[in-house]
Amino acid sequence: MRLSESAGGTGPVAILVRVEGDEVVERLHQGLVELSRVDEVRCRRYAGGWLLTACGVPNADPDPLLRTVGALVDQFDSLAEVVDVRLGGSELPSGLDGYRISTQFKVAGRDCPIDSGTLHLDAAHVFGTGAHASTKLAVQAMEEIAGREGRLPARVLDVGTGSGILAMIAARLGGELVQGIDICAEAVGVAQRNVVANDLQERVFVASTPLAELPESFGLVVANVTASVLLRLAEEIVGRLQPAGWLIVSGLQGRQGEEIEEALGSHNGLKTVARYAEGKWRCLTFRNSSLA
């Protein structure tokens, strides 16, 4: 895994490592705690194994820590795997104006009234403010589907929901039941608070349920994750699509867009509908043409 692929700037970084075996998790936990660039290490049971979350020191360049953790994890071969990398604690606006993330939506401070085009986020603990290009591209893709179809499909899944911003926008664009999932327990708590703050708790639900354990299928699946995570989850993601369902994947850099398009295109019935780019970042929209 190219650990630096999801580092879009400086700020507190959270590196999520899935581990098998009690002895391995103890050794790896100790190794992470001893790293000078790690501020905190959290550990919890997850999907038959363990999930370690190494939180970097605030306001530090994340890349050196990403490389160090990658080398440490590699020592345990297949018993440990980095499954996600994300930046948190990004600065949020405090005033009324905020900042626009698409033609329809903006993020603004809590003193700005809630309306259909404004989102409020928890400024204390953020896992995605909407300001990153990968999020903006995913929003653009959702807006275009909603414009083409009149609204988004009734059932939407947001994989790696982070702050919940894409799940909430999906609800604003017509999703009647939006499920956000994230393996990071802190992100789930943050997203749940954001959903309530934006009065969307009747339509948006966030949990740490593993993707493989979701029994439902969805008319739209959005996955703004790293390329390596997307490849690992590809079968499960495609398997959650309803016939004629839409898939939006973002968080890709450069040639990763072509690689992911080729990989997902190998799945029967999945066709590329649109491609988006901003700087080095790429986003793709697919549609499932398979029959029920």
Image: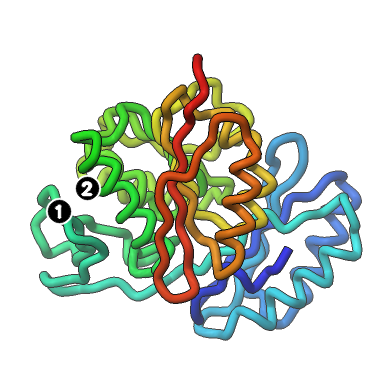
What label does residue 117 carry, if any? Answer: 1
- The residues tagged by marks 2 and 1 sit, at their Cα atoms, a distance apart of 11 Å
Instruction: Look at label 2 and name its amino acid.
Output: Asn
* Residue 147 horizontal/vertical position (percent): 21, 43
Callout 1 amino acid: Gly
Which x, y percent locates residue 68? 77, 77
Q: Which of 151 and 11 lies nearest the eye of the viewer?
A: 151
Q: Quadrant of the N terminus?
A: bottom right
The tag on residue 35 is none
Say whether residue 179 is visible: no
Task: Tell me, yes or no, if residue 21 can be seen here.
Answer: yes
Q: Please, what secondary structure does the residue beneath circle 2 have? A: loop
Please name the residue shown 86% across and 64% down the image.
Answer: 74
- Along the line of sight, the residue nearer the viewer: 42 or 161: 161
Q: Percent x, y for residue 136?
A: 34, 62
Name the secondary structure under disc 1: loop
Total of numbered circles in the picture? Answer: 2
Q: Are marks 2 and 1 in contact (CB under 8 Å)?
A: no
Q: Determine whether, in the image, residue 72 is placed left or right of residue 98.
A: right
* 106 lies above or below 64: above
Judge from the rendering whether residue 57 lies leftward or rightward of residue 73; answer left or right: left
Residue 80 drawn above or below residue 182: below
| 160 sits left or right of 80 in the view | left
Dot 2 corresponds to which residue? 198
Q: Nearer the viewer, mark 2 or mark 1?
A: 1
Mark 2 / mark 1, whichever is N-terminal: 1
How packed mark 2 is, by other alpha carbons closer than 10 Å (few <14, some 14-19, many 20 or more), is some
User: For the point 63% across and 68% down, which residue is it?
Assistant: 40
- Whether residue 143 sits left or right of residue 96 in the image: it is right
Residue found at x 35% / y 64%: 129
Closer to us: 98 or 123: 98
